[in-house]
Amino acid sequence: MKKLVFNTTIIILSVLALPAFSQIRFGVRGDIGLNNPTYKSDVLKVENMTNYSIGPSMETMLPLFVADVGVDASLLYSNNRMTVSKIDENVSKKITNHYIKLPLNLKVKFGIGLHLVKMYATAGPYAAYLISGEKIDLDEAAKDIKAKSFEAGTNLGLGFEVLRIFQIGVNCGFKLTDNYKTDKPDWSDPLNGKTTCWSITGSIYL
């Protein structure tokens, strides 16, 4: 998985070396998670899963005849929260994990009307690195649940750009790795069950 992310990163960085007439802009991006699912097994239940991300972003686009083609890249602080509880006991804990997230996307824009509004589509990989997290301590469960330090996946997104400054869209992220390593299979499913995450994405570019 890390090799796949590395190879894709090299390809996208190569695309960044666009001709001098390409458009390079910097801005700020924020994501807010839309889904708040509940996962449970016979032993463990995970609910109230929320997340948000914010950080600097860069976009470089090459104007072509019918569309603009390029890449965007961001460096995001991501805050993920959830509540973990044992079903057979009145024991629960709120967990917050903090990540540095690196999405790299190929991007295509199409003009609408007088090009004051453009539609865009994005696709690409992301990697997230755990910078700090709370321990899942539910009696004897503590020794069986370990947070992984690396997460990877892919993104697909659609949205609109207004006045060449504001971008808002919907993103679907597909996890390709698990967030937690557990020794018991009936604990692994709810903790790693959130494999798809929908979010609203907003960016401001100058």
Image: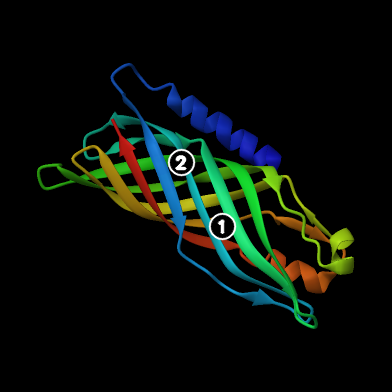
The structure residue drawn at horizontal position 89% and vertical position 59%, both measured from the top left corner, is 143
Q: Is mark 1 on a helix, strand or loop?
A: strand
> Residue 83: horizontal and vertical position, in percent?
65, 67
Q: Quadrant of residue 137?
A: bottom right
Give the mark nearer the N terminus: 2 vs 1: 2
Residue 174, image x and y in percent?
Answer: 56, 57
The quadrant the N terminus occupies is top right
Q: Which residue lies furthest to the left in this view?
A: 114
Mark 2 lies on a secondary structure that is strand
Report the Cα–Cα distance between label 2 and label 1: 14 Å
Residue 108 located left or right of residue 46:
left
Place of residue 175 in the rendered image (x, y in percent of width and height, measured from the top left): 61, 56
* Residue type, label 1: Phe
Residue that carries the numbered disc 1 in the rendered image: 174
In the depicted view, which residue is nearer to us: 138 or 195? Answer: 138
- Residue 118, percent across and down? 22, 46
Up the image or down, 3 lies above or below 179; here it is above
According to the picture, the residue beneath numbered tag 2 turns out to be 105
Q: In this view, does 126 lie to the left or right of 58?
A: right
Q: Which residue is drawn at 75% across and 57% down?
A: 180
Q: Mark 2: which amino acid?
A: Asn
Q: Which of 132 and 70 is in front in this view?
A: 132
